[in-house]
């Protein structure tokens, strides 16, 4: 068996184990610990916040165009999510608007 195939099989096994492990641990009538319930509620918002900060960290706020395309894209994403409650429409729409502004307007 080749080295690459062994690596692929090991990665597959690790991925599947991590996917099925929660179902094995919390199966049956055992309640989910309160700490995990809290993590499940707060982690998605924290991850999105980190992604926004990461995306805006290299914006040149003091040089033309002063981060305006990024701010318009972010504002569109937030407003469209508030109106539609659809993550995909909001994220793809904000990204598409940002790309149009950067490539065709500026």
Image: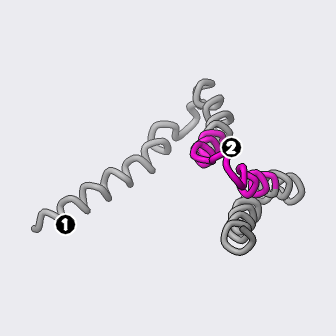
Q: Nearer the viewer, residue 85 or 34?
A: 85
Q: Return the residue at label 1.
A: 5
At 72% from the left and 55% from the top, the residue drawn is 65
**The magenta stretch spans which residues?**
49-75
Q: Is residue 64 magenta?
A: yes
For the residues marked 1 and 2, what is the alpha-carbon distance in whole angstroms?
51 Å
Give residue 57's position: percent from left, percent from top.
Answer: 59, 42
Give residue 19's position: percent from left, percent from top.
Answer: 45, 50
Q: Is residue 52 magenta?
A: yes
In this view, the residue farthest toward the front is 63
Q: Return the residue at label 2.
A: 62
Q: Nearer the viewer, residue 92 or 12?
A: 92
SS at mark 1 in the image = helix
Q: Give the side of residue 35 with respect to residue 41, left or right.
A: left
Mark 1 or mark 2, which has the lower sequence index?
Answer: 1
Quarter of the image for residue 100 reads bottom right
Q: Give the side of residue 75 with respect to residue 24, left or right.
A: right
Give the foreground label among 1 and 2.
2
Circle 2 residues within 10 Å: few <14, some 14–19, many ≥20: few
């Amino acid at each position: 068996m080749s080295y690459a195939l062994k690596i692929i099989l090991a990665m597959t096994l690790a991925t599947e184990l991590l996917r099925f492990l929660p179902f094995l641990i919390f199966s049956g009538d055992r309640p989910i610990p309160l700490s995990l319930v809290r993590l499940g509620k707060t982690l998605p918002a924290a991850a999105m916040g980190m992604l926004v900060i990461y995306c805006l960290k290299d914006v040149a706020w003091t040089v033309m165009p002063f981060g305006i395309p990024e701010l318009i894209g972010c504002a569109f994403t937030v407003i469209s999510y508030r109106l539609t409650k659809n993550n995909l429409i909001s994220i793809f729409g904000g990204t598409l608007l940002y790309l149009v502004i950067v490539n065709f307007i500026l």
